[in-house]
Structure formats: structure tokens, C-alpha cells
Image (cartoon, rainbow, N blue to C red):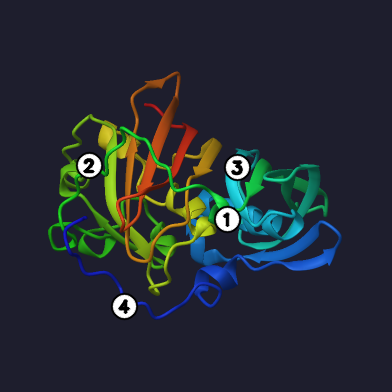
Amino acid sequence: MPEAATAPAARATIGDSEFDRDTALTRRGPGVYDIDLSAGWTIISAVNGGYLLAVLGRALADALPHPDPFTISAHYLTASQPGPAVVRTELVRTGRTLSTGQASLLQYDDEGNEVERIRVLASYGDLDSLPDDVRTSAKPPAIPSMEQCFGPQDGPSPVPGSSAITDRLFLKLDPSTLGWALGQPSGKGEMRAWFGLADGRDADPLSLLLAVDALPPTAFEIGLSGWVPTVELTVHVRCRPAPGPLRVSITTRNLAGGFLEEDAEVWDSADRLVAQSRQLARVRLG
């Protein structure tokens, strides 16, 4: 078990929290949903990709016959902005244990034309029906206790105007991955942190879609700065997380041609690997 740590008291509950309210959709018709994307989940002026994936994940959970995302892959086509958006879903296939669907999130430009922001393909199932047999060589990340880690409130914002989403998160970053904040990046491309929602809401499969994309970019520890927009993000949800804080570990092994990958693992308070992800992101060089 991880070392005892202090996390926000559980004030909000699953289904009744800021995250739930800000990802809630209104069904306009079969497979079509309206939402007002909250400015509270922005980085600079763009809406965070993990929050957007949770919005699409919630729409698919309503549209598909199975409740939980098992695997979900998103291509980010254009930057989303706070404000009205439409989500359109389509059932691709349904079976006894898995159903597959696709979804697109669209907004309108200044001329009133629809602009597709994200396109997703996902398979859903029932996490509660999975067997308990686990055979793994994976190990939880070694992160110091929360008292030895640091949050966004302990230093200046790494990107001007990026504090909106951090106000909604409980983040305690491993000091060994914070060299970038001191002007001394390690060059290792690693980021590790304790993670939760600021209002104390426990994690569920939808909030795991946010967790994999909520830490500072590994590009900071490689010695780069600025926005690192996601091109493609695939998440595998492995089991329903236990109550309590999560531990998130993200690594980058290869930056080439202005693109890098980020591999993330999310572990719950019971030392279980509850989610994995890989994304391709673009960086600005020079």
C-alpha cells in the first residue's frame, strides 16, 4: 500500500461535483447532445484535451448499451474553445460484452459553419463484470508522500494564463520531476504526481480520461516550454478505481520532428493499475 497521505476531504460525490456538472450534456435527439464547454478547464485559451475526452466519454456512455469506457481513441482536429458545442454519436456495433461507437464534437465558426474539433472511436463494456485474475509485471510509481511533493500553488504558473484547470485539480508533483520549474530540467521526460479533483470527488472511469492528460507536459523536463497540443490520445481503462488519491506517472522516450509521445499510467489507492494511455503531441522547437 502507498504511504499515508493527506488528500482533499471528500466533499463532492460522483454525480454531484464540478466535474460532473461541467461534463453534463443535454440530449437534443437520438445520438445528438448539446453542451456548454466550461472555461474552467482551459490551458491558455484552449480547452484541456482530457476534459474534452471525458465529455465525449459521457455522451458515449449514454448512447451505447454498455456503461464504461474500455478503450477510447481521440484525434484532436482543431482547438476547442469555451462555449456551446454539439456532440454527435453513432453506434457502430454491439455485442454481449462490448459495444463500439464513434462520436464527434463540433463547434461553430464566426460564419456559423460547423467545425469538427475531435473525433473519437471507443469500445465500452461493464467494468464490474471483469474477472479478478491479474497477472502483471507493472509496479506502482515510487512517489514521495504528499507532504514532500509540490502543487501549482507552490510556484508561478508555468504557462501564462494556464491556471484555470489547475484550480479544479488537486496536484502534488514529485520533486524529482520539477527541475523545469527551477530552470534546471532533467532531460529525462518524466512527470509524476498525486492526482485528484479539488472538490474531493473520488475517481471513476470518466475522470480517468481526464487524469491521463492533466499533468504538466513531459516536454518541460526535456527543456521545452509552451503549449504542447495533443494530436491523438488513446486511453485504456483497466478497472474501476478505489476511493482515494490517484498516482499518475507519464514518460516520454522519443522527441523527433517536432512530435513526442507520452505514455501514462494511473494507479489507485489499492495499488491497482486502473488506466493506461499513449498520446502523440506536437511541440514548438526553437
Closer to the chain start, of discs 2 and 1, is 1
Question: Could you say whether the residue bearing mark 3 is in a helix, strand or loop?
Answer: strand
Q: Which residue is mark 3?
A: 72
Residue at x 42% of width, y 58% of height: 241
* Other residues around mark 2 within 10 Å, as few (<14) / some (14–19) / many (≥20): some
Nearer the camera: disc 2 or disc 3 = 3
- State the image coordinates of residue 281 (x, y, percent, origin top left): 48, 33
User: Amino acid under label 4?
Assistant: Ala
Measured Cα–Cα span from mark 2 to mark 3: 31 Å
* Other residues around mark 4 within 10 Å, as few (<14) / some (14–19) / many (≥20): few
Q: Which residue is mark 2?
A: 180
- The answer to whether the residues at label 1 and label 4 have Cβ atoms under 8 Å apart is no
Measured Cα–Cα span from mark 2 to mark 1: 29 Å
Measured Cα–Cα span from mark 2 to mark 4: 30 Å
Measured Cα–Cα span from mark 3 to mark 4: 30 Å
Question: Could you say whether the residue bearing mark 2 is in a helix, strand or loop?
Answer: helix
Nearer the camera: disc 2 or disc 4 = 4
- State the image coordinates of residue 145 (x, y, percent, origin top left): 16, 58
- The answer to whether the residues at label 2 and label 1 have Cβ atoms under 8 Å apart is no
Q: Quadrant of the N terminus?
A: bottom left
Q: Furthest-left residue in view? A: 148
Q: Which residue is mark 1?
A: 54
Residue at x 79% of width, y 67% of height: 27
User: Amino acid under label 1?
Assistant: Ala
- State the image coordinates of residue 195 (x, y, percent, origin top left): 33, 58
User: Amino acid under label 3?
Assistant: Ile
* Other residues around mark 1 within 10 Å, as few (<14) / some (14–19) / many (≥20): many
Q: Which residue is mark 4?
A: 9
User: Amino acid under label 2?
Assistant: Trp
Asked whether, in this view, residue 41 is left or right of residue 196, the answer is: right
Q: Quadrant of the C terminus?
A: top left
